[in-house]
Amino acid sequence: MSTGEPPVSAPRADDPRRDGSPPLERREVRASDPHLSDETNARLTEELREIVGADVVEVPVDRERIAEGEYALRPTWTGYLTQNRVNIVRLLLIALTFEPCRLLAQ
Protein backbone atom coordinates (compact mmCIF):
# COMPACT_ATOMS: atom_id res chain seq x y z
CA MET A 1 0.00 0.00 0.00
CA SER A 2 1.21 3.52 -0.60
CA THR A 3 2.15 6.25 1.82
CA GLY A 4 -1.03 8.18 1.06
CA GLU A 5 0.70 10.74 -1.12
CA PRO A 6 -0.37 11.11 -4.76
CA PRO A 7 2.21 10.20 -7.37
CA VAL A 8 4.45 13.20 -7.99
CA SER A 9 6.32 13.89 -11.18
CA ALA A 10 8.82 16.59 -11.99
CA PRO A 11 7.17 19.81 -13.22
CA ARG A 12 7.26 20.16 -16.99
CA ALA A 13 7.28 23.29 -19.11
CA ASP A 14 4.02 22.15 -20.78
CA ASP A 15 2.25 21.52 -17.44
CA PRO A 16 -1.44 22.41 -18.10
CA ARG A 17 -1.82 24.00 -14.68
CA ARG A 18 0.51 26.81 -15.68
CA ASP A 19 -1.90 28.12 -18.32
CA GLY A 20 -4.82 29.04 -16.09
CA SER A 21 -6.36 25.58 -15.62
CA PRO A 22 -8.53 25.17 -12.54
CA PRO A 23 -6.62 24.73 -9.29
CA LEU A 24 -6.28 21.26 -7.82
CA GLU A 25 -7.41 19.93 -4.47
CA ARG A 26 -6.53 16.76 -2.58
CA ARG A 27 -9.27 14.17 -2.12
CA GLU A 28 -9.30 10.85 -0.34
CA VAL A 29 -9.72 7.78 -2.55
CA ARG A 30 -12.71 5.96 -1.07
CA ALA A 31 -15.96 4.26 -1.96
CA SER A 32 -19.04 5.29 -0.02
CA ASP A 33 -22.02 4.00 -1.96
CA PRO A 34 -25.08 4.08 0.33
CA HIS A 35 -26.55 1.08 -1.53
CA LEU A 36 -23.57 -1.12 -0.55
CA SER A 37 -22.69 -2.56 2.84
CA ASP A 38 -19.87 -1.05 4.89
CA GLU A 39 -17.79 -4.17 4.27
CA THR A 40 -18.30 -3.94 0.50
CA ASN A 41 -17.41 -0.23 0.51
CA ALA A 42 -14.26 -1.02 2.49
CA ARG A 43 -13.19 -3.74 0.01
CA LEU A 44 -13.97 -1.46 -2.93
CA THR A 45 -11.98 1.37 -1.32
CA GLU A 46 -9.02 -0.98 -0.90
CA GLU A 47 -9.21 -2.04 -4.57
CA LEU A 48 -9.53 1.57 -5.75
CA ARG A 49 -6.47 2.60 -3.75
CA GLU A 50 -4.56 -0.35 -5.13
CA ILE A 51 -5.46 0.60 -8.71
CA VAL A 52 -4.81 4.33 -8.25
CA GLY A 53 -1.69 3.71 -6.23
CA ALA A 54 -2.45 6.31 -3.56
CA ASP A 55 -4.78 7.01 -0.65
CA VAL A 56 -5.13 10.66 -1.67
CA VAL A 57 -5.24 12.14 -5.19
CA GLU A 58 -5.27 15.60 -6.68
CA VAL A 59 -8.28 16.53 -8.81
CA PRO A 60 -9.57 19.81 -10.26
CA VAL A 61 -11.52 21.83 -7.69
CA ASP A 62 -14.61 21.96 -9.93
CA ARG A 63 -14.80 18.14 -10.33
CA GLU A 64 -18.10 16.66 -9.11
CA ARG A 65 -18.11 15.06 -5.67
CA ILE A 66 -19.91 11.89 -6.67
CA ALA A 67 -19.36 10.29 -3.27
CA GLU A 68 -21.39 13.13 -1.78
CA GLY A 69 -24.23 12.86 -4.31
CA GLU A 70 -23.03 15.58 -6.67
CA TYR A 71 -23.35 14.61 -10.35
CA ALA A 72 -22.67 16.24 -13.67
CA LEU A 73 -25.61 17.86 -15.41
CA ARG A 74 -27.89 15.48 -17.25
CA PRO A 75 -28.03 15.86 -21.03
CA THR A 76 -30.77 18.05 -22.46
CA TRP A 77 -33.09 17.26 -25.38
CA THR A 78 -30.98 19.54 -27.57
CA GLY A 79 -27.89 17.55 -26.67
CA TYR A 80 -29.71 14.29 -27.35
CA LEU A 81 -30.88 15.49 -30.77
CA THR A 82 -27.41 16.76 -31.61
CA GLN A 83 -25.76 13.47 -30.68
CA ASN A 84 -28.31 11.39 -32.59
CA ARG A 85 -28.92 13.64 -35.60
CA VAL A 86 -27.54 11.09 -38.09
CA ASN A 87 -29.87 8.36 -36.82
CA ILE A 88 -32.84 10.75 -36.80
CA VAL A 89 -32.19 11.80 -40.42
CA ARG A 90 -31.74 8.16 -41.41
CA LEU A 91 -35.02 7.21 -39.76
CA LEU A 92 -36.85 10.04 -41.55
CA LEU A 93 -35.37 9.04 -44.91
CA ILE A 94 -36.39 5.41 -44.41
CA ALA A 95 -39.90 6.46 -43.41
CA LEU A 96 -40.21 8.75 -46.43
CA THR A 97 -38.89 6.03 -48.73
CA PHE A 98 -41.27 3.29 -47.61
CA GLU A 99 -44.40 5.36 -46.92
CA PRO A 100 -45.04 6.16 -50.64
CA CYS A 101 -44.49 2.46 -51.49
CA ARG A 102 -47.09 1.46 -48.91
CA LEU A 103 -49.57 4.02 -50.30
CA LEU A 104 -49.01 2.83 -53.89
CA ALA A 105 -49.63 -0.79 -52.88
CA GLN A 106 -53.16 0.04 -51.68
Image (cartoon, rainbow, N blue to C red):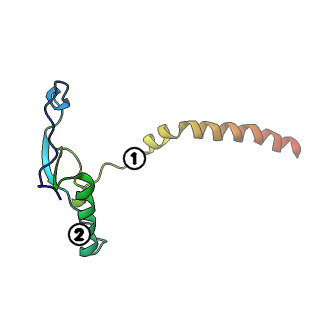
User: Which residue is depicted at the point 54% across and 37% down?
Assistant: 85
User: Which residue is depicted at the point 28% across and 65% down?
Assistant: 44
User: Which residue is depicted at the point 39% across and 46% down?
Assistant: 75
Picture layout, residue 11 above or below residue 101: above
The spot of residue 49 in percent (x, y) is 22, 58
Picture layout, residue 25 above or below residue 1: above
Label 1 sits on what residue type?
Pro
The spot of residue 1 in percent (x, y) is 18, 59
Label 2 sits on what residue type?
Ala
Decide which of tag 2 and tag 1 comes sooner along the chain. 2
Please name the residue that numbered disc 2 is placed on: 42
Q: CA distance from mark 2 to mark 1?
A: 32 Å
The spot of residue 67 in percent (x, y) is 23, 60
Count residues near mark 2 (Cα–Cα under 10 Å), then give few for <14, some for 14-19, many for 20+.
Answer: some
Query: Residue 13 or 32: which is nearer the viewer?
Result: 13
Of the numbered discs in the image, which one, if any, rests on residue 75?
1
**Disc 2 and disc 1 in contact, CB within 8 angstroms:** no
The spot of residue 73 in percent (x, y) is 32, 48
In this rendering, which labeled residue sits more in front, label 2 or label 1?
2
- Residue extending farthest front: 1
Relative placement, left or right, of 37 versus 98 is left
